[in-house]
Amino acid sequence: MKIDDFHKHSHELVDWMFKYLKEIEKYPIKPNIEPGEIYKSLPSNPPKSGESFEKIFDDFNKKIIPGITHWQSPNFHAFFPANNSYPSILAEMLISTIGAQCMMWDTSPAATELEQKVTEWIRDSIGIPSNWSGVINDTASVATICSLLTARENHSKFNINTDGFSDNKYKVYCSKETHSSIEKAVKIIGLGSKNLYKIDTDANLSMDLKKLENQINKDIESDNIPLAIISTYGTTGT
Ligand SMILES: Cc1ncc(COP(=O)(O)O)c(C=O)c1O
C-alpha cells in the first residue's frame, strides 16, 4: 500500500467506524452462527501475494463482522462494560501510527514518563501512600503475576529468582469470589495452588476477615509464611 492509498482508506475506515458506532444498536449482540462456520469460510492457505484493500475490507464485512459479539452495544449486559470510548479509539489511532516500543525509557522516553505520571494520579486518587509507585501491565493476569513475584522476591531477598525454591512455606489468601486469574498466577510462579486459601465471604460477598485472621494465625503457628493477601474490588460474579 502506498502512502496516498493509506490516506484514502484511513478516511474510509473512519467513516465506517462512525457509522458502526452510531448504528451499533441495530446489530444482534451475539452472532447467529454455528461453531466452526467462520473457520470453514476462510481459505485453507493464506494468499500468495498481497490483496487489495477493497477485497480485504469486503472479507471483513462479509466474514468477520457476522461473527462478532458487539461488546460496545448498549444492549450488551454480559461481563462488564469494557474496552473503549471515543477518545480511547482516537488514542489507539495515534498509538498504532507511531508504533512506539515502550519497554524502557530509551525506547520511548515520553511513554515511560507519561506512565509514571498517570500511575501517580491513579495512586493518589485511590488513597495509596505517595511513596508508592506503579507500572501499567498489559493484562490483569500479568499484573497479579508481577505483584506476587514482587512479594515472593521481596521476602526471599531475590534468592528464589537465582536458586529456585528449596522449601516452599508461602501462603497466599484471597476471597472465594476472586477471579480465576489469581489461582493461575499462584501456579505459574511456583507457589502451588494448595497454598492459596480462598477465604469464605459474608452476605455482601466481602472476604470474612475473622476467617482470614484465623487462617493466617494457623499458618504462622505451623511455621508457614503468609506472603500476600489479594483483595477483590467488586466481585467477578456480580
Ligand atoms: C475480575 C477479573 N479479574 C481478572 C481478569 C483477568 O483478566 P485478563 O484476562 O486481562 O488477565 C478478568 C477477566 O475477565 C476479570 O474479570
Image (tube, rainbow, N blue to C red):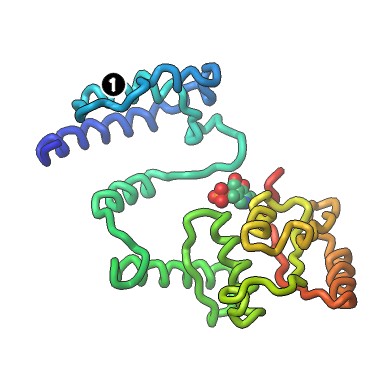
The residue carrying pointer 1 sits among few (fewer than 14), some (14 to 19) or many (20 or more) residues within 10 Å by Cα, namely: few
**Label 1: element kind:** helix
Instruction: State the residue at coordinates (35%, 20%).
Output: 43
Three-letter amino acid code at disc 1? Asp
Tell me the quadrant of the picture where the C terminus can be found: top right
Q: Residue 141: horizontal and vertical position, in percent?
A: 58, 55
What number of labels is visible?
1
Q: Residue 83: horizontal and vertical position, in percent?
A: 47, 44
Q: Is residue 238 visible?
A: no
Instruction: State the residue at coordinates (68%, 49%).
Output: 180
Q: Residue 38: horizontal and vertical position, in percent?
A: 45, 21
> Which residue does the numbered mark 1 point to in the structure image?
58
Instruction: State the residue at coordinates (67%, 71%).
Output: 165
Q: Is residue 122 visible?
A: yes
Question: Does residue 31 appear to the left or right of 101 in the view shown?
Answer: right
Question: Does residue 122 appear to the left or right of 159 in the view shown?
Answer: left
**Quarter occupied by residue 206:** bottom right
Task: Indicate if the residue with disc 1 has its beta carbon within 8 Å of ligand 1.
Answer: no
Tell me the quadrant of the picture where the N terminus can be found: top left
